[in-house]
Image (cartoon, rainbow, N blue to C red):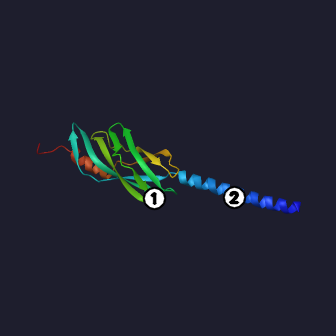
Amino acid sequence: MAAEHVVIGVVLGGIGVGELRDSRAQRERSTAVSLVALPESGYSGGSNSRGTVVLDGQLTLINTGPAPITIRAVQAERPGVQVRGMGEARHVRPGGTGQIRVDLQLECATAFDLEPLSVRFSVETEDRRLREVRYPVALVGSAWQENALHLCEPRLDS
């Protein structure tokens, strides 16, 4: 009889440990954030004032993580470049894509450094906690550079 209790205890203990491990793995999956961000045109207007171009742009976000995420904020800054999200949250399922509008301020002479721009995202995960994630975005050769260069070029008719 005592041996049966030991066997039952071992089996139940094994099940409990397995469920605990599964629960921990599920929590880790639901809090993991992995994304890719690509600058897209989404160009709807711009201006050039003293060598600084202001544009409306767009970032395409790809959720490469295992759980859905909500992008709450986007921001990046370095000499010659400022990027700010337009305040709209975007829910992106695993493997899915979403777009977020951004305001861009680019100095014609210095914005397009070969070094990628480190973009900071405030991301809400399934556990309703905010996490900060960074992703390097290449500006050189991007739609943002193409749009900005049209406004940076001196006009012959002015």
Give the Cα distance between marks 2 and 1: 28 Å
- Relative to 68, residue 103 above or below: above
Mark 2 or mark 1, which has the lower sequence index? 2
Quadrant of the image containing the N terminus: bottom right
Q: Which mark is residue 23?
A: none
What amino acid is at disc 2? Gly
Residue hosting label 1 = 93
Position in image of residue 69 (x %, y %) = 47, 53
Residue 11 can be seen in this image: yes
Residue drawn at 51 percent across, 52 percent down: 126
Q: Classify 10 Å Cα crowding around label 2: few (below 14), some (14-19), many (20 and above).
A: few
Disc 2 is placed on an element classified as: helix
- Quarter of the figure with residue 63: bottom left
Residue most toward the left?
Answer: 157
Residue drawn at 72 percent across, 60 percent down: 15
Quadrant of the image containing the C terminus: top left
Could you say which is closer to the camera, residue 143 or residue 8? 8
Q: Classify 10 Å Cα crowding around label 1: few (below 14), some (14-19), many (20 and above).
A: some
Residue hosting label 2 = 18
- Number of marks present in the image shown: 2
- Quarter of the figure with residue 51: top left
Residue 141 can be seen in this image: no
What amino acid is at disc 1? Arg
Residue drawn at 59 percent across, 56 percent down: 26
Residue 66 located left or right of residue 143? right
